[in-house]
Amino acid sequence: MINKIIKKIKEGQHFLITSHTKLDGDALGSELALYCMLSDLGKKAVIYNEDKTPDHYSFLPSAEKIANKLDDVSKFDVAFILDCSELERVGEKAKEIARIKTLINIDHHISNNGFSPLKLWDGQASSTGELIFRLFEKMRAKMSPEICTNLYAAILTDTGGFRYTNTTKDTLYAAGKLVENGADPQWISENIYENDSPVKIILMKKALETLSLDFQNQVGSLVVTKSALKESGATYEHTEGFVEIPRSVKGISVSILYTQLEDNYYKLSLRSKGKISVEKIAKKFGGGGHANAAACRIKGNIEVVKEEVLEAIKETR
């Protein structure tokens, strides 16, 4: 399959690159690395994301090239759909993007629904960034410092700083090669993890007031409400990393962040340690992801939603 993707890259001239809404480091780093590689080959490429780039990823090379508007898709030969388990995750433009002649899906989510026959998928890979690294190695593509910085950021964030169980020898091999070719681990980490705005810290304080520990301190959760966002002057992007706070508590097996999207409608980010699969929990509510990191959305009063999720965890344990 990887050879077919390389063939499409060689044949194509106009490429669209996109990823899911609620952007994270893996999505952005993967998009930007692919954009840099195609540009180095003399191809025309456009990165389109429905959501704006979070501030703490604006340092990534070529981040200023990302567009948040997409008009005519007829000019594109190929569309790369990155880090998406289903096409709908790109947002409102999904149906238009589906009309592009060739769709290539590069993804590592075990919940991938196979929407694209042409794909580079590995549910055991740490990140989409790791898969793109494999693609570039196979192509013998030029590994510029810009490409390496973007891919390192992608892998770093989706492995939780190389702490999650999805960190394998292949992951560390890729990271080592990226550092060898120009990625600066300290600089990248500082920009991502040590560059929070004051409003994020204020929002974090409000979120910590909602900390709940259940099942004899084995399940921890935080809630971010619309009113908390408004009062702190924060946006949804400022919640990134909050789900890791309960996860850091001794004895916690499952960590959950409930983020209010609308009245009685919540996005859930789930993380786990050990053998509990939060992917199975998220799947019960129409979501998906990985064994130790998943997400879903649930309608209902927050107390009712919590009860439903705790029951699902109980059934999964």
Image (cartoon, rainbow, N blue to C red):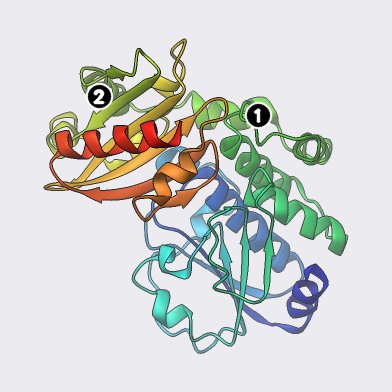
Q: Which residue is mark 2?
A: 207
Would residue 12 be visible to someone looking at this image? yes
* Residue 204, x across and y down, in percent: 29, 23
* Residue 104, x across and y down, in percent: 63, 72
- Furthest-top residue in this view: 250
* Residue 233, x across and y down, in percent: 19, 34
Q: In front here: 133 or 301?
A: 301
Amino acid at pointer 2: Ala
- Assess disc 2: are there few (<14), some (14-19) or many (≥20) residues with their C-alpha within 10 Å of its C-alpha: many
* SS for callout 1: loop
What's the mark number on residue 274? Answer: none
Q: Where 117 sits versus 276, above or below? A: below
Q: Quadrant of residue 173?
A: top right
Name the image quarter holding the N terminus: bottom right
Q: Which residue is mark 1?
A: 162
Q: Earlier in the sequence, mark 2 or mark 1?
A: 1
